[in-house]
Image (cartoon, grey):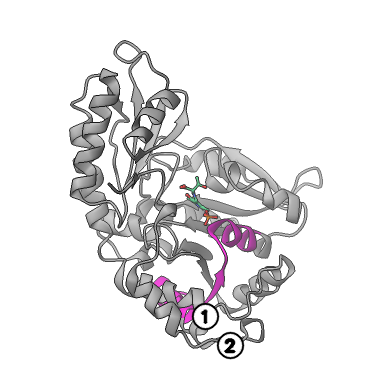
Amino acid sequence: MSIVDLRSDTLTQPTPAMRQAMAEADVGDDVYGEDPTVNRLQEISAAKMGKEAGLFVASGTMGNLVAILAHCDRGDEVILGNLAHSFLHEAGGISAMGSVHSCQIPNRPDGTLKLDDIQAAIRPDDAHFPITRLIVLENTHNRCGGVPLSVEYTHAVAKIAQEQNIRLHLDGARIFNAAAALGVDAKDLVDRADSVTFCLSKGLCAPVGSVICGSRPFITRAHRIRKQLGGGMRQAGILAAAGIVALESMVDRLTEDHARASRLARSLEKIPGITLDPGTPYTNMLYLSLDEDFVSLTGTQVAELLDEMDIKVGVVSERRFRLVTHYWIDDADVERTVDAFSKAFLM
Ligand code: TLP
């Protein structure tokens, strides 16, 4: 029986249509700007985000790093959430590679940063302080449960940024999940931001890659930084071809993943010993905890038992899991997962 892998949507394999497009892709040297497939992917991406230009990069991490370095000089400060992926899970790249200072403010459970906290974090013009250059928001917010941030909220943050002459970058790794959940166009979620990174390799199933979008001068700067980081990828059209299939055929189906995450949640919450986070799932992720009164096993032990039944889940802390639905999870997989959790608790 096949493995049901719910650890992340990063585990998605390319679809048959992607493999075919990759095999047939027209390629050239992208460092010379001559890969027609990369150029097309960048144009389609920019159009989808309503921005002037796009830049194909190796990963979401690289996209955030390149964007932040393109916005900030050494010693500049970026305001971001204490649960932001770019703060927690990107190996400190912005300080290691760019000497960019970070100011973390608490993420609220809905993934937002309090507007007053943002205002208060902006530094006055005083030689004692770093220069506040950038605000980073994450949409959907991964650690806050895959929750989408609304157009209105993003606009409110952008207004603060504009008034204070600060830039706004969106880590939109899953911006299309946010758009699908909110029933809006992804363009509306990014229209007031100076830049956005979105991923082709998560729920959209491409094997590799993300795209940074922004103004043409910004992308020109980002292009040089990508080169400095060793991210010039030559015949990358092989990869971009899958990205084009992702954008053209995988975006509209994301609501199916959200519906399956909901069905999974509704069934799992009936099992004594499982407590779902309030509101979960918002999109394709659900976070749940084991109730000590019912389940004496640790999260790792439960994950091992599930693994023996070919179900893989993410253990995020001692008694807490993350389950992520995606293209390769079907209705039968949802049932197998619920069944496996019930059995694991009886063992
Ligand atoms: N997130 C991964 C892990 O790194 C946690 C996952 O499994 O969810 N921004 C956000 C919001 C992300 O969730 C991720 C990946 C990234 C950026 C980085 O993308 P990659 O993995 O392509 O570097």
Where's residue 17, x and y in %? Answer: 33, 74
- Depth check: give the residue in front, 118 or 320: 320
Task: Tell me how far mark 2 sits from mark 1, CA to CA.
Answer: 7 Å
Rendered residue at 21%/32% (across/down) = 339
Rendered residue at 42%/73% (across/down) = 242
- Residue 188 figure quarter: bottom left
Q: What residue is disc 1 on?
A: 237
Where's residue 233, x and y in %? Answer: 63, 74
Rendered residue at 55%/61% (across/down) = 59
Q: Secondary structure at mark 2?
A: loop
Regarding residue 130, the answer to whether it shows in the image is yes
Q: In the picture provided, is 334 more to the left or to the right than 130?
A: left
Residue 28's disc is: 2
Q: In the picture provided, is 35 more to the left or to the right than 222?
A: left
Compare marks 2 and 1 and give the one earlier in the sequence. 2
Rendered residue at 42%/39% (across/down) = 144
Q: Secondary structure at mark 1?
A: helix
Where's residue 138, x and y in %? Answer: 47, 50
Where's residue 195, x and y in %? Answer: 53, 65
The residue sitting at the top extreme is 293
Q: Residues within 10 Å of mark 1 (few under 14, many from 20)?
A: many
- Circles 2 and 1, Cβ within 8 Å, touching? The answer is yes
Q: Residues within 10 Å of mark 2 (few under 14, many from 20)?
A: some
**Which amino acid type is marked by label 2?**
Gly
The residue sitting at the front extreme is 1
- Depth check: give the residue in front, 237 or 108: 237
Segment colored magenta: 41-68
